[in-house]
Image: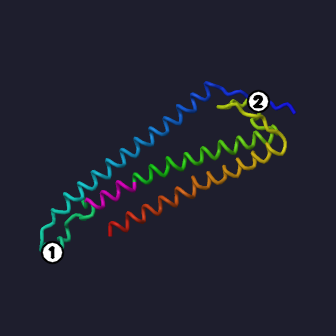
Amino acid sequence: MDQQIIRADRRLRVMTLAAAALVLVSGAVMLALLSAELRELRTSGSDAAGTAVPGDDAPPPAHAPAVHAADPLEMAIDRLERWTTVLGWIGGLGFVGAGAWLFALGWRINRAGQYPPPRMKVIRDTRVRTGPQARALANVLQLAAFVLIAAGVVGTWWLHQVAVRILQHAGR
């Protein structure tokens, strides 16, 4: 049996590696920014902890502004809630995007009856699979797509809700 091999596209390989490096660097930058934010919150929280006057338990006058508006803990919780929202959107969109791409690839494989589908470039030399092997691969890719999309939508929403509840509980 003559096995057909699709040769790797060098340009696609370089672009894929560059994109992966960009994602890793972006992730490292986001982690560094989050770390700096947490350090700032810790130091501002410890600075604010010493500002209370011992024995000053008198209630504020009725016309006094709400204390929680300037409360460092509430401000920190608000900032962390914004961070969880931004990171949730980034993660969710990444999962949904990857799932959509996998679903489309599975669809193309099913239509063509082979992997890789015609005119698809690959990053390494790849043996063409046809028939039941190709259909099985397409089905696995589409199942993985549904899992990724569900993780992107439901999973990141759930993680965000849990993080917000934890932060709100810390503020009590």
Q: Which amino acid does label 1 sit on?
A: Ala
Range of the magenta residues? 72-81
* Tags 2 and 1 touching, CB below 8 Å: no
Q: Which residue is drawn at 52% across and 58% down?
A: 157
Instruction: Name the residue located 57 percent from the left edge and 58 percent from the top edge.
Output: 154
Residue 123, by quadrant, is: top right
How many residues crowd around disc 1 within 10 Å: few (fewer than 14), some, or many (20 or more)?
few
| Prevailing secondary structure of the magenta residues | helix
Residue 132 percent across, percent down from the top left: 83, 45
- Please tell me whether mark 1 sits on a helix, a strand or a loop: loop
Q: Is residue 4 above or below residue 82?
A: above
Q: Find the residue positioned furthest to the right.
A: 1
User: Quick one: 50 or 71, which is closer to the camera?
Assistant: 50
Q: Quick check: 122 left or right of 83?
A: right
Residue 136 x %, y %: 78, 48
Say if the magenta span includes residue 74.
yes
The residue at which mark 1 appears reads as 58
8 left or right of 89?
right
Mark 2 belongs to which amino acid?
A: Ile
